[in-house]
Amino acid sequence: MQVTSNTPVRTQLLLAALLATIAGYVDSYAVQKFAVFASFMSGNTTQTGLHAGLGQFAAAAHQFLPIPCFVAGVAVGAFLLEGELKKPVRRLCGLVAVMLAVSAVATRFGSLANTVSIIAASFGMGAMNTVLSQVGRQSVSLGFVSGDLNQIGRHLALAVRGTPLPDAVSAGNTRWRRAGVLAIVWLCFLTGAGLAGVWMLFLVEWTLIPPLIVLCYLAAFYRSPQSS
């Protein structure tokens, strides 16, 4: 079971903000370290096609590598969250933390181990994307914020036209408010990407330590009304 509709919206938004920050952070780290995205699979897909078209098949394979790993992470995350596992959100955050730890440690063993790092980071980001899919009635994307930006634009356009929400639950639940929720998620992703750039200057090979700490905290202490 995911974070449910019974979880307070503020709690959902805080969790979404934390996870989006981590997604941006890890994506930025992966681009700088391995020249691939860990959660933005559209970017990897474009690069795979580009390099294949140029006949650069080794580079295309490198860009393709994160894609099946990300999908596998989503599949495992969805399987765990839809099952009868107790405290699935905490367990899943723990799994993502383990994957990032593997990715961080593997970088210490040379260029060949970078493949392991990419696999672990991409799998972890795929799994993390299943933790939360909504804030209240608003669907959100944690690691591929193009969808969030698309929804912001739609909400703004329909708000100007005065088109009401079909699933509004209160007078304050407006298109402007939902656009604000999506903007927060996008800004957190952007902030995470920036923080990774800053911390790489100081932590170097251990840049993944900050998101690891946050994920370990969530794995140990996260609570929801349904004990997720």
Image (tube, rainbow, N blue to C red):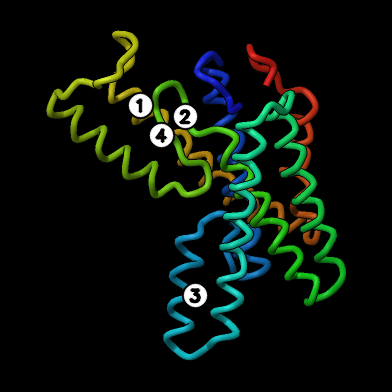
Q: Residue at x 43, y 70 (%)?
A: 46
Where is mark 3, residue-wise? 48
Q: Quadrant of the N terminus?
A: top right
Label 1 or label 3, whichever lies nearer to me, is: 3
Image vertical order of residue 76 relative to residue 3, above or below: below
Measuring 53% from the left and 18% from the top, which residue is drawn there?
10
Where does label 1 land, which residue?
178
Three-letter residue code for mark 4: Leu
Between disc 2 and disc 1, whose residue precedes? 2
155 or 136: nearer the viewer: 136
Q: Nearer the viewer, mark 2 or mark 1?
A: 2
Q: Report crowding for label 1: few under 14, some 14 to 19, many 20 or more residues within 10 A (C-alpha).
A: many
Do the residues bearing badges 4 and 1 touch, measured as CB atoms within 8 Å? Answer: yes
Q: Which residue is mark 4?
A: 182
Report, in whole angstroms, how far the alpha carbon at label 2 lies from the one at label 3: 30 Å
- Residue 155 on image: x %, y %: 26, 32
> Of marks 3 and 4, which one's residue comes earlier in the chain?
3
Q: Which residue is mark 2?
A: 134
The type of residue carrying mark 1 is Arg
